[in-house]
Image: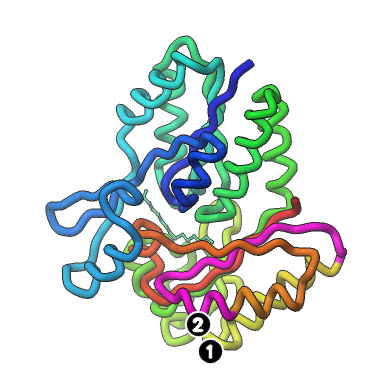
């Protein structure tokens, strides 16, 4: 059985890595006024963070169902199955789009996978799936492996300005709680597929320290972990953080990643995050 691996642009897997592991990418869109851009295709993260300084605040949208159908049909010429890995169904309709498209194609079996997370942790699932697919593993076996990894996946992050998440309706909590959080730097995480405050913390420095400690709780087992440091246009700070983390946790393999245009629209510039899962 030949299995193709698809993920969406919010995994922010660099093109050379996608090419290396034969991962197909379907882009989400970022919209400035009347202009829609497919992220990672028409607009880079760098261009996006420049444009937000100059233009009205953007919005985002999921890929149209037709784009999924087209992609799955193209893949059906060379593959028997496709595993389509997407950002959490609790924050975007992308996964639901893949599910709908899966019922509209023939000659290929589609396995949609809800990562229940986003960004590079989602990318780590896609890379693992792609490595297994290239070895010729069956799609069912790859899906079981992804479910296994899911049990160990965590992501904690903080936004410099929570109003972006509030405006886009992606922060799930009572309005009064959100209001009280706007003045501080809460650590956020995914719970039951949606973003909720994890802990109310006053400063950026303390929030980052707390996230370091949370990774430490899991890494203390000494088992091999993989992790991603993720930043919204704060490359230097992210590199410093990564070096600090590498010294603290030698059993964790770190990669550097970024919040691209679509996720950046909802988190705002300056956001930082750390995601990890067992190897
Ligand atoms: C859409 O328009 O369908 C896309 C909506 C994306 C919402 C993104 C909300 C922020 C996610 C933060 C993920 C952090 C992972 C480490």
Residue 49 percent across, percent down from the top left: 30, 69
> Which residues, given as a range, are shown in magenta?
221-240
**For the residue labelled by badge 2, is the local secondary structure a helix, a strand or a loop?**
loop
Numbered mark located on residue 185 in the image: 2
- Quadrant that contains the N terminus: top right
**Residue visible at 44% across and 14% down?**
77
Q: Is residue 101 above or below residue 244?
A: above
Q: Give the residue number, with chain letter if any, for mark 1.
A: 203
**Residue visible at 66% across and 61% down?**
227
In the image, residue 228 lies in the stretch drawn in magenta: yes
Q: Is residue 178 above or below residue 87?
A: below
In the image, residue 173 lies in the stretch drawn in magenta: no
Query: Visible in this render: residue 178?
Result: no
**For the residue labelled by badge 1, is the local secondary structure a helix, a strand or a loop?**
loop
Residue 205 percent across, percent down from the top left: 57, 88
Pick out the residue farthest to the left.
Answer: 34
Numbered mark located on residue 176 in the image: none
Asked if residue 217 lies left or right of residue 229, the reply is right
């Amino acid at each position: 059985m030949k299995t193709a691996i698809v993920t969406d642009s919010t995994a922010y897997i660099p093109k050379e890595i996608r090419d290396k592991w034969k991962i197909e990418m379907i882009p989400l869109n970022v919209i400035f006024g009347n202009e829609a851009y497919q992220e990672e295709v028409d607009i880079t993260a760098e261009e996006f963070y420049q444009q937000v300084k100059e233009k009205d605040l953007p919005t985002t949208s999921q890929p149209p169902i037709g784009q999924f159908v087209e992609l799955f049909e193209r893949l059906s010429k060379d593959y028997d199955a496709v595993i389509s890995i997407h950002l959490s169904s609790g924050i975007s309709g992308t996964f639901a789009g893949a599910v709908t498209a899966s019922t509209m194609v023939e000659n290929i079996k589609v396995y949609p996978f809800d990562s229940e997370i986003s960004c590079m942790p989602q990318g780590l699932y896609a890379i693992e799936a792609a490595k297994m697919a290239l070895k010729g593993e069956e799609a069912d076996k790859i899906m079981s492996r992804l479910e296994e990894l899911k049990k160990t996946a965590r992501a904690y992050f903080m936004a410099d300005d929570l109003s972006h998440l509030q405006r886009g309706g992606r922060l799930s909590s009572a309005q009064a709680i959100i209001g009280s959080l706007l003045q501080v730097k809460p650590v956020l995480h995914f719970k039951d597929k949606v973003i909720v405050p994890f802990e109310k913390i006053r400063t950026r420095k303390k929030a980052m320290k707390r996230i370091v400690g949370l990774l430490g709780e899991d890494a203390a087992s000494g088992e091999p972990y993989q992790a991603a440091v993720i930043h919204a246009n704060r490359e230097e700070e992210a590199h410093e953080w990564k070096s600090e983390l590498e010294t603290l946790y030698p059993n964790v393999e770190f990669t550097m990643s970024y919040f691209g245009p679509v996720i950046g629209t909802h988190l705002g510039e300056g956001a930082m995050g750390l995601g990890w899962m067992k190897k």
